[in-house]
Image (cartoon, rainbow, N blue to C red):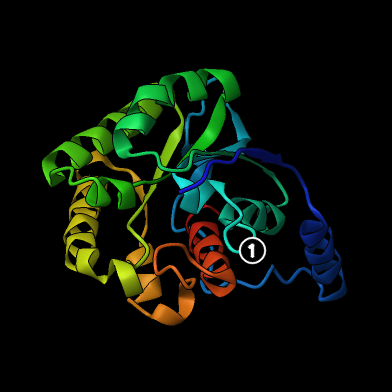
């Protein structure tokens, strides 16, 4: 997975969405859900900015794959807020755990969006180690008064189908982890439903439709 990092502010998509809202008398942006289930007004963000989101992950977060934008800039347009892309291509959950504190200190985000696991599987990391790293990332966010929002995995299809059963097991473990830690959960695995039509030709990275689906899944959880 290749590397990439961008800061995305209110984009043209967000402007278009705002215009549509005004024309439609306040109707929201297109979404597969009815808004966040969480009481955001009761969240103590400390001195963090509740309008700043940091996306932490590997190339599924960080890269433009096969000529399509990943989910963070799409999410920025939907929210009309800042989404900072801290995705690093090829990174495992251990890499994320190693830099999460510096990322939180640098950006002081209200929300940390977490998506790791594919590279852990490809490199043969055991599930307990991966979950331990993800738990550390979640706890670092909570200690920083940043809301941790963790996602299950996107499918592994085609040439990566060998790891599909491992992806399903790890996604189940991530669901349990979110429940244990009180993290907000984006269930990308359920949204994609192992449909290869959402995946690029390599079978590992979401295609345009898949990146849009992932952005909507995060939007529905945090909006």
User: In the image, 5: left or right of 80?
Assistant: left
The C terminus sits in image quarter: bottom right
Above or below, 164 against 179 in this view is below
User: In the image, 4: left or right of 172?
Assistant: right
- x 78%, y 61%: residue: 13
Above or below, 130 against 22 in this view is above
Above or below, 166 against 85 in this view is below
Whether residue 164 is visible to the viewer of this picture, yes or no, is yes
- x 24%, y 45%: residue: 123
Percent position (x, y) of residue 20?
A: 82, 71
The image quadrant of residue 156 is: bottom left
Number of other residues with Cα within 10 Å of mark 1, as a class: few under 14, some 14 to 19, many 20 or more = some
- Residue receiving disc 1: 68
Q: What element carries label 1?
A: loop
Whether residue 157 is visible to the viewer of this picture, yes or no, is no
Above or below, 32 against 3 in this view is below
Q: How many labels does the image show?
A: 1
Percent position (x, y) of residue 143?
A: 36, 22
Percent position (x, y) of residue 69?
A: 64, 59
Q: 104 or 27, which lies in front?
A: 104
The image quadrant of residue 7 is: top right
- x 42%, y 20%: residue: 101
- x 56%, y 74%: residue: 209
């Amino acid at each position: 997975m290749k590397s990439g990092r961008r800061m995305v502010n209110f984009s043209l998509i967000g402007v278009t969405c705002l215009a549509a809202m005004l024309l439609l008398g306040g109707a929201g942006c297109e979404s597969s859900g009815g808004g966040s289930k969480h009481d955001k007004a009761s969240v103590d963000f400390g001195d963090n900015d509740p309008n700043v989101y940091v996306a932490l992950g590997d190339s599924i977060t960080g890269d433009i794959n096969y000529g399509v934008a990943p989910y963070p800039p799409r999410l920025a347009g939907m929210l009309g807020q800042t989404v900072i892309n801290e995705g690093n291509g090829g990174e495992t959950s251990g890499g994320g755990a190693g830099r999460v504190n510096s990322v939180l200190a640098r950006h002081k985000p209200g929300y940390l969006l977490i998506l790791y696991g594919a590279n852990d599987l490809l490199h043969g990391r055991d599930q307990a180690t991966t979950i331990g790293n993800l738990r550390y990332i979640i706890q670092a966010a909570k200690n920083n008064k940043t809301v941790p929002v963790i996602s299950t995995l996107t499918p592994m299809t085609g040439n990566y189908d060998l790891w599909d059963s491992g992806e399903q097991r790890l996604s189940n473990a991530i669901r349990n982890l979110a429940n244990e830690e009180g993290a907000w959960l984006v269930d990308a695995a359920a949204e994609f439903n192992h449909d290869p039509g959402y995946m690029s030709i390599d079978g590992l990275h979401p295609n345009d439709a898949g990146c849009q689906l992932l952005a909507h899944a995060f939007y529905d959880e945090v909006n």
